Image (tube, rainbow, N blue to C red):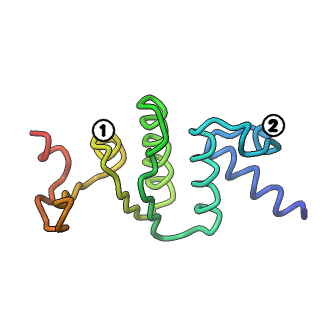
Amino acid sequence: MSAQLAAQMRAHADELGLSSALLEQYPPALTPLDLQRLRLGRALALEPKLLLAEYPTAMLEPADAEALGRDMSRIVARRGMAALYITADRAFAQLAADEIVMLKPATGDLVSAVGWRRWLG
């Protein structure tokens, strides 16, 4: 591995709160949160303008989902990118998203599309 690639990997790991030791582990040794952070890191390594995350909290405990939501929101804002989260986790959506679009499960018909602060109000 080149020094430049190693430096990029370290920078992405630091951004995601992943230790060097964790990067040396095999996936079965990692927590679900660390696995999701690694998956996010793989996507971010491509430096996309849009991040599409489908059910990013599906296998996480509520506290870990909250931590991931804070991380994703911070990273998206700092990088100046857009993100589209597909989730049924309302708490995550409220934490990570600026706007929420709700669709009917069976038909996909639009239920509402508002900034989440108005949605809660």
Q: Residue furthest front?
A: 106
Q: Residue at x 62, y 55 (%)?
A: 41
Q: Determine crowd level at label 2: few under 14, some 14-19, many 20+ residues with C-alpha closer than 10 A.
A: few
Q: Determine crowd level at label 1: few under 14, some 14-19, many 20+ residues with C-alpha closer than 10 A.
A: few
Query: Left or right: 53 with respect to 1?
Result: left
Quadrant of image for the N terminus: bottom right
* Amino acid type shown at disc 2: Ala
Above or below 71: residue 41: below
The residue wearing badge 1 is: 91
- Please state the horizontal and vertical placement of residue 45, each as a whole percent of the image: 65, 63
* Amino acid type shown at disc 1: Ala
Secondary structure beneath disc 1?
A: helix
Above or below 85: residue 64: above
Q: Residue at x 78, y 45 (%)?
A: 26
Q: Residue at x 44, y 37 (%)?
A: 65
Query: Left or right: 35 with respect to 86?
Result: right
Quadrant of image for the C terminus: top left
In which image quadrant can residue 84 be found? bottom left
Q: Dots 2 and 1: beta carbons under 8 Å?
A: no
Q: Residue at x 62, y 46 (%)?
A: 15
Disc 2 from disc 1: Cα separation: 31 Å
- Please state the horizontal and vertical placement of residue 60, each as a whole percent of the image: 48, 38
Q: Earlier in the sequence, mark 2 or mark 1?
A: 2
Secondary structure beneath disc 2?
A: helix
The residue wearing badge 2 is: 21
Q: Nearer the viewer, residue 110 or 51?
A: 110
Give the number of marks.
Answer: 2
Q: Nearer the viewer, residue 110 or 50?
A: 110
- Please state the horizontal and vertical placement of residue 112, each as a whole percent of the image: 12, 58
